[in-house]
Amino acid sequence: MAEKFNAVLVTPKKVVLDKEVEEVIAPGIVGEFGVLIGHTPMLTFIKPGIFSYLENDKFTKFAVGAGFCEVLKDSVSVLVDEAYTGEEIDPKEAEAELAALQQQLSQADSAADPKGFEQLTNKVKVAQAKVSLAGG
Amino acid sequence: MASLRDIRKRIASVKNTQKITNAMKMVSAAKLRRAEEAIKSARPFADKMRAVLMSLASRANPAAHPMLEARPVEKALLILITADRGLCGAFNTNLHRRSEAFVREMKEKGVQVHMINVGRKGNDYFRRRQVPIVDRFINVMNSVNNELAGQVVAVAAEQFMSGEFQEVYVLYNSFRTAVSQIITLKRLLPVVPDEPDTARQLEYLYEPSEEELLASLLPRYVQNQVFTGLLDSVASEHGARMSAMEAATTNAEEMIYKLTLKLNRLRQESITTELMEIVGGAEALKG
């Protein structure tokens, strides 16, 4: 069994995860990355997607929003806008949300309101992550 | 000398007041529970963010971002977070006193202080005093959210970045327990690490780049600090109001007790006097 390190996942609403894990896989802005103990210290943005950690040979997944992540030698801190576990998501609701957001996105004008468009894109990505998590 | 009627009226009036204070206490208690939950769940995120930012700031070159740069201070900006309403004990008064002390302290150092007021009470107080007010946000405490913090920070950050002000402070009541608030004064800008640890120059990766991370994280950090300050203040306000109203209800109870005692005494006295008069009258007739 791999050596463990401390992983923390917090949102402005609550501490979602704070425990000793073996591995963390997070959606970084320049690509998904995995972290084991002894990783080089690093600071990076997190883009909306699936965050997972390995504990006792079992992966647990979360759908997360945008944020950032600090990796230190013996700990990982992930700070994101939102995070959901698989049980928290109702598949039907998530799909409806995704459809509604995609509808909005197709009508949105990226030139007129680049910031709003980016936010919307992010929301869609979170919704996609939620759907894929709920689906399996 | 108060008549029986007067005392009865006063008892009725105190009883009404007591009903009001008791109701306010209940309302505050309910609101406190929600506000307490909000601040307690927001704290871990804020603390973590602070820790990350501090370690980032201690490594980063101060010239990498204007928000990191400490400049000679001539003018400072104070964001004062008070309540919109009174009837919460010394909650607002303490803040006023502390901010006046702060303005004096800074003056001695040759720094002029301007203010941003969040909450009606602080604005009312400083409107008539010799402190220039840059901006005000009043009647906002009922719906504290991240947007509000964003608006406040936008004003402060603009003033700071334009070079108008060299430091930004925030003053608010920090929530400890329902009955204790701690006045907290924090320097918001520039972001300067608590203790620059040059010893710990480890190899460190930034993705995509240090500048981009700083540019995105610093404003978010500042906004988050103000947001937690607002949440702290709201929870403190309800706590302070609850204990103030609790005290008022107890005082009313005591007052009612004393007045009732007085009323009964007066009533008995008048009965005794009347009896004496009747007996005296009867004696006189006999004689």
Image: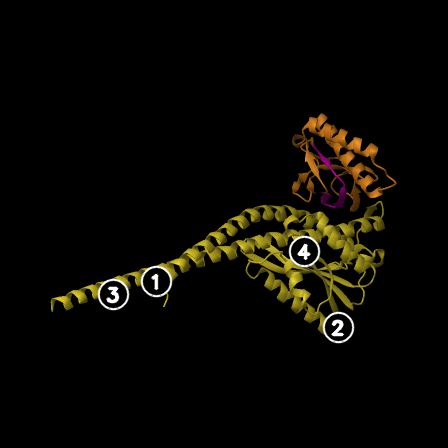
| Dot 3 or dot 2, earlier in sequence | 2
| Dot 1 or dot 4, earlier in sequence | 4
Q: What element carries label 1?
A: helix
Q: Viewed as shown, does residue B218 lie left or right of B144?
A: right
Question: Subunit of mark 1?
Answer: B
**Labels 1 and 4 share a subunit:** yes
| Dot 1 or dot 2, earlier in sequence | 2
Q: What element carries label 4?
A: loop
Residue B189 location (% of width, % of height): 76, 59
**Labels 1 and 2 share a subunit:** yes
Instruction: Determine the residue positioned at 35% across, 59% down.
Output: B260
Question: Subunit of mark 3?
Answer: B
Structural crowding at the residue carrying mark 1, measured as other residues with C-alpha within 10 Å and reported as few (<14), some (14–19) or many (≥20): some
Instruction: Determine the residue positioned at 69% across, 39% down.
Output: A4
Q: Is the magenta stretch mostly helix, strand or loop?
A: strand
Q: What is the residue that sits farthest to the right in this orientation?
A: A111
Marks 1 and 2, Cα distance to the nearest angstrom? 60 Å
Q: What residue type is labelled 3?
A: Thr
Marks 3 and 4, Cα distance to the nearest angstrom? 60 Å
The image quadrant of residue B154 is: bottom right
Q: What is the residue that sits farthest to the left in this orientation?
A: B287
Residue B174 location (% of width, % of height): 62, 56
Q: What residue type is labelled 2?
A: Gly
Q: Mark 4 highlights which residue?
A: B138
**Labels 3 and 4 share a subunit:** yes
| In front of the other: B146 or A6 | B146
- The orange-tinted chain is A
Q: Is residue A63 magenta?
A: yes
